[in-house]
Image: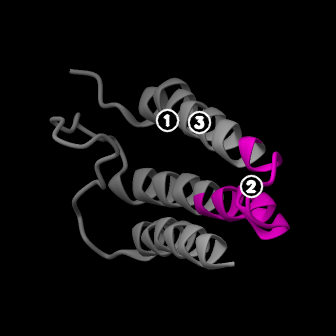
Amino acid sequence: MTAFIIWGGMGSIFTIYGIYACFTKKALPFGFWANAEMFKVKDVKAYNRAVGKLWCVFGIVFILLGVPLLTGKNSPYVIFSILGCMAEAIGVMVVYVTVIEKKYRKEE
């Protein structure tokens, strides 16, 4: 149970970050990659909303992937949480690069 509470807490942090990105009034785009220079964005508000939605979906799916942790100690179903989390992270990166970045990158 403790593992799921920690897992759910992390998923909640991702979701809260996404909600904050969706509704921020800042004129700066939210970065997706850590320690990477941000590209020029066409529409900052729409970009932040798209990134926020992506983080919200990531957080909710992350929490759902933690459900096998509730089955108890030494459960073989925990492998679904681990592999699902890896697949989800790769999927989010693919969506960001192929959809969001392509749509909102300002051509110079």
Q: Horizontal and vertical percent for residue 96?
A: 49, 35
Tell me what residue is drawn at x 46 percent, y 27 percent.
97
The total of numbered circles placed on residues is: 3
Q: Nearer the viewer, mark 1 or mark 2?
A: 2
Question: Mark 1 or mark 3: which comes first in sequence?
Answer: 3
Q: Horizontal and vertical percent for residue 64?
A: 76, 61
Q: Horizontal and vertical percent for residue 68?
A: 80, 59
State yes or no: residue 37 in magenta.
no
Looking at this view, is 27 or 76 the one in front? 76
Q: Mark 2 points at which residue?
A: 74
Looking at the rendering, the stretch of residues picked out in magenta corresponds to 59-79
In three-dimensional space, the C-alpha distance between marks 1 and 3, rounded to whole angstroms, equals: 16 Å
Q: Nearer the viewer, mark 2 or mark 3?
A: 2
Tell me what residue is drawn at x 39 percent, y 60 percent.
45
Tell me what residue is drawn at x 61 percent, y 78 percent.
2
What is the number of the mark on residue 86? 3
**Quarter of the picture holding the C terminus:** top left
